[in-house]
Image (cartoon, rainbow, N blue to C red):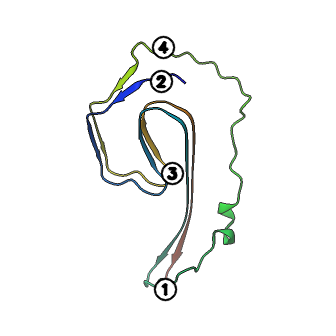
Amino acid sequence: MYRRTSIVPNIYINSLAFSSVFEIGDADTIQANSRAIAVQRQFPLFVEGEADFSDYQIFSEPIPSPDPDETVSTTFIHENPVIKVQSMYVIGVSNSSVIQVGSSRSVNAEARVKHIRQLLD
C-alpha cells in the first residue's frame, strides 16, 4: 500500500457513534460492524432483554461479496506524498460508517438495523 502523510489542521465532528471510524492517516484494514433493534412506540415502555438478534432473519442472512478473482485494471499516479485537507466539518457519522483522510487496503463495513413500530389502535 502506498503510504502518504495526511494533514488536516481543522476538524469538527459533532457525533461519531455505533462502530464508526474516523481515521487520519493510512490503515491496512478497517472493520466496522453494527447491529441494532430499534423499537419505536407510541406509548413509551422500556423492557430490558425483550428482543434477540436471532429472532430476526435480517441479522443472519449472508451478505453477498464481490468476486475477489475479478481482474480490475487501475493506474495510480502519486505525484505528491501528502494529502492536505484544510478543514472538515461533519455533523454526524453512525452505523459502521468511515471517514478517512488517507489510504486503506481493505474496508469492510456492515450495518444491520431492524426497525419496529408499535402503534396503538
Mark pair 1, 4: CA separation: 60 Å
Image location (x, y in percent) of residue 73: 63, 18
Task: Report the mark closest to the observer, 1 or 4.
Answer: 4
Which element carries disc 1, helix, strand or loop?
A: loop
| Real-space Cα separation, disc 1 to disc 3, in angstroms | 33 Å
Q: Are marks 3 and 4 in contact (CB under 8 Å)?
A: no
| Among the two numbered marks 1 and 4 on one chain, the one whose residue lies closer to the N terminus | 4
User: As shown in the figure, which amino acid type bears the numbered disc 2?
Assistant: Arg
Query: Looking at the image, is mark 1 or mark 3 nearer the viewer?
Result: 3
Label whose residue precedes the other's in the sequence (2 or 1) = 2
Q: To which residue does mark 3 refer?
A: 96
Q: Looking at the image, do the residues carrying marks 1 and 4 touch, with CB atoms under 8 Å apart?
A: no
In the picture of the structure, the residue carrying the numbered disc 2 is 3
Q: Give SS at disc 3.
A: loop
Per the model, the C-alpha gap separating discs 2 and 3 is: 24 Å
Q: Name the residue nearer the viewer: 119 or 11.
A: 11
Three-letter residue code for mark 4: Ile
Position in image of residue 58 (x %, y %): 65, 62
**Relative height, residue 28 to residue 41 (above, below):** above
Q: Nearer the viewer, mark 2 or mark 1?
A: 2
Above or below: residue 120 compared with residue 109: below
* Disc 2 versus disc 3: nearer the observer: 2
- The label shown at residue 21 is none
Instruction: Check disc 1 and report the residue beneath it.
Output: 120
Q: Dot 4 corresponds to which residue? A: 77
Report how far apart the C-alphas of labels 2 and 4 lie in the structure. 13 Å
- Separation (CA) of disc 3 from disc 4: 30 Å
- Residue under the image location 59 percent in, 18 percent down: 74
Residue 84 relative to residue 47: left or right: left
Instruction: Say which quarter of the image contains residue 35.
Output: bottom right
